[in-house]
Image (tube, rainbow, N blue to C red):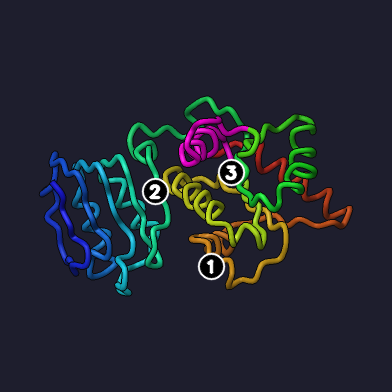
Amino acid sequence: MTLILSRNPLLHIEPGAFKDIYLRELDIRSAFASSAAQKAGLQALHGLNVKRLKFGKYKDDYRIFSSDADYLDGLCFINFHEVYYYMKERFQFYLQYCCILLRGYRSPGQQECSYDAFVIFSSYDEVWVMNELMENLENGVPPIQLCLHMRDFQAGKSIASNIIDEGIMGSRKIVVVVSQHFIESAWCRFEFELAQSRFMMERNANIIIIILEDVEEKKTKKVFGLHKHLKKNTYLKWSRDPLSNMRFWIRLRKAIIATNH
């Protein structure tokens, strides 16, 4: 059975009304009248089992609220196997195995991690990542093991699954290398959104931002959550100045090694 609630200005859903019900598809794009109704409505869907979930913005509907922390937290009340996220009038990404973030979730602090940090970066910045980041961290003392997509992702496995299993879930920390290329990369934006999902579930500062080059403030708003994260959290800025460079590596190494509380 398919349930389409999209483009309905819902004010209230009775809590528990959908408990233990199985749906082939649930469409909740642009389905709530206000952010408060959206938050309460998603929580009221607790216990609902869905094979395919569609959420985000319905085409030509400008009333939709941004997918903020309340929206993403609310999705944790729904058991689903596939999720489709729609934004800016076009299909953004399809993600299988997203239920790993919702059911049977274990934080990296509760499981054995293969890597110290997963690095999110644009392929255009690969030279800096290999020659500077990898060289200084993996060959330093003590050595820090990085998860790099071009080297450590499993061949034959979907990119989305590799990002989750090897990167997000298989690493203690997440390092994000922000540059002009990062801002323009759809995959970088996708990886950063997944990283924030883990951040919200753990409530710990696992995301370490490196500003590789100056980026206009308005451009950081193109990446969901990045502008807000930079405003609320301390980040590192790369510099070619020898003294600043030395401080940079000391602070980065300390941030990655630090244990979360």
Q: Residue at x 64, y 52 (%)?
A: 122
Q: Position of residue 225 (x, y in %)?
A: 50, 60
Whole-angstrom CA distance, mark 2 to mark 3, is 22 Å
Circle 2: residue type: Tyr
> Is 65 situated above or below 134?
below
Residue at image position (31%, 73%) is 60
Q: Is residue 112 left or right of residue 85?
A: right
Q: Which residue in the rendered view is the most extreme toward the right?
A: 242
In this figure, which residue is indicated by the disc labeled 1?
221
> Where 175 sits versus 151, above or below?
below
User: Which of the pair 38/261 is nearer the observer?
Assistant: 38
Mark 1 or mark 2: whose residue is earlier in sequence: 2
- Between the residue at mark 1 and the residue at mark 2, the CA separation in whole angstroms equals 22 Å
Report if the CB atoms under discs 1 and 2 are less than 8 Å apart.
no
- Total count of labels: 3
Residue corresponding to mark 2: 94
Disc nearer the start of the sequence (2/3): 2
Mark 3 is surrounded, within 10 Å at the Cα level, by few (under 14), some (14 to 19) or many (20 or more) other residues, namely many
Q: Secondary structure at mark 3?
A: strand
Amino acid type at image mark 1: Lys
Q: Mark 3 sits on what residue?
A: 174
Residue at the image point whose x is 63% and y is 43% from the top: 119
